């Protein structure tokens, strides 16, 4: 017989991809198992009411009669398997896109409900919509209980998310555009800026992923001759938009970092992130912080113009370092510069909580 308190304990200490979604997972378990009272949970370690699907490779099929009739469900050997099995179940193709809809427990539950967690995929009918909305509101009503249970079982206190909207969008500077492809500035060693921008964006995303902060990388190139402006417009609904670049100059200049904002549309918050990020990159790479040293961060940049015309909270454009000046290892520098970008973003998010 499986025990409900054991299950809560196992879930509380489990390592899952998005810690902030544990409350959603537990709220569903409360609803589906009636606080652990269902036989499906007690006998078969399945508190989630998950029907058997072959992709859930750590489960075996078991016939079970629920309130809506007999069906084949997942049976797990252990509660640890059940917690893992849930995420394997979620990661099936039918739920494709769930990671982009996981900024909050509500976004997540709404997405998987419409994708088919309850009553199959949304079929466009009013009945189908009502069934899903009813399920969503039942689960959401249980989130405070789930939060309390997890906190009491508390291996680690559940941190309130530090983002308020969809999280972070990192834009890879240059690359595809309406007229083809463009590789940005050329480095001292023949390397292209565009390739370094990708290295930095991936490094930044890794840091944000590890902190559980939703982050997407975009390499969208715009749809018409207002290309850059279009790119900026994709910042809508995000907390932070950061366009990632590397600098180049045809004159003598000291190696340094700078983070720019839109000259007329940028506000105090954009400027704040600009100076925090510029400082973080400069310190990481041991180079000059050009913003702290009097460089005006305001420029009329098309990509930031588009971003500022959305409801994004802040938008900046980071120039990590000058690639026409030799550095020991461009890959290493761009990786560390990208990580510094992520750290600055997290500091800003915490500061503006
Ligand atoms: Zn550039």
Image (cartoon, grey):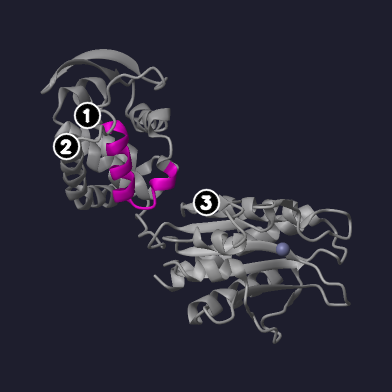
Residue ID for mark 2: 131
Which secondary structure lies at badge 2? helix
Q: Report helix, strand or loop for mark 3.
A: strand
Q: Establish if 201 lies above or below 8.
A: below
Do the CB atoms of the residues marked 2 and 1 lie less than 8 Å apart?
yes
Range drawn in magenta: 99-117
Q: CA distance from mark 2 to mark 3?
A: 31 Å
Q: Position of residue 91 (x, y in %)?
A: 42, 32
Dot 3 corresponds to which residue? Answer: 216
Q: Which mark is residue 224?
A: none
Ligand 1 closer than 8 Å to the CB at disc 3?
Answer: no
Give the residue displayed 77% in from the left and 53% down from the top.
331
Q: Quadrant of ligand 1?
A: bottom right
How far apart marks 1 and 3 lie (CA) works out to 30 Å
Residue 281 belongs to the span the image colors magenta: no
Assign the magenta stretch its main secondary structure.
helix
The alpha-carbon separation of the residues under discs 2 and 1 comes to 8 Å
Tell me what residue is drawn at x 56 percent, y 59 percent.
231
Q: Position of residue 207 (x, y in %)?
A: 57, 54
Q: Quadrant of the C terminus?
A: bottom left
Closer to viewer: mark 2 or mark 3 = 2
Residue at numbered disc 1: 119
Instruction: Kindly give the residue lying farthest to the front in the view shown.
Output: 225
Q: Residues within 10 Å of mark 3 (few under 14, many from 20)?
A: many
Report if residue 230 is visible in the image.
yes
């Amino acid at each position: 017989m499986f025990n409900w308190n054991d299950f809560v304990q196992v879930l509380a200490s489990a390592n899952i991809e998005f810690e902030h979604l544990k409350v959603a997972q537990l709220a569903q378990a409360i609803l589906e198992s009636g606080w652990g009272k269902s036989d499906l949970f007690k006998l078969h370690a399945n508190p989630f009411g998950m029907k058997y699907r072959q992709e859930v490779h750590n489960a075996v099929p078991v016939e079970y009669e629920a309130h809506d009739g007999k069906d084949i469900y997942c049976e797990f050997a252990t509660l640890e398997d059940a917690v893992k099995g849930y995420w394997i179940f979620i990661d099936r193709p039918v739920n494709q896109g769930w990671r982009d809809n996981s900024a909050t427990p509500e976004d997540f539950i709404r997405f998987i409900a419409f994708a088919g967690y309850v009553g199959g995929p949304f079929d466009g009918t009013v009945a189908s919509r009502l069934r899903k909305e009813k399920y969503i509101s039942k689960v959401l009503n249980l989130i405070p209980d789930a939060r309390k249970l997890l906190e009491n079982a508390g291996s680690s206190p559940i941190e309130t998310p530090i983002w308020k909207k969809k999280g972070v969008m990192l834009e890879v500077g240059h690359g595809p555009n309406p007229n083809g492809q463009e590789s940005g500035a050329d480095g001292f060693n023949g390397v292209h800026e565009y390739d370094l921008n990708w290295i930095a964006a991936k490094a930044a995303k890794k840091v944000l992923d590890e902190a559980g902060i939703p982050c997407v990388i975009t390499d969208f190139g715009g749809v018409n001759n207002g290309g850059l402006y279009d790119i900026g417009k994709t910042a809508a609904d995000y907390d932070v938009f950061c366009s990632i670049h590397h600098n180049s100059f045809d004159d003598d200049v000291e190696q340094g970092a700078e983070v720019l904002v839109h000259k007329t549309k940028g506000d105090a918050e954009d400027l704040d992130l600009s100076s925090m990020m510029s400082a973080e990159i400069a310190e990481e790479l041991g180079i000059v912080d050009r913003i702290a040293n009097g460089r005006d961060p305001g420029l009329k940049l098309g990509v930031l113009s588009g971003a500022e015309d959305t409801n994004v909270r802040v938008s900046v454009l980071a120039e990590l370092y000058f690639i026409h000046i030799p550095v020991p290892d461009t890959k290493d520098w761009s990786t560390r510069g990208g990580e510094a970008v992520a750290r600055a973003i997290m500091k800003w998010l915490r500061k503006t909580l």
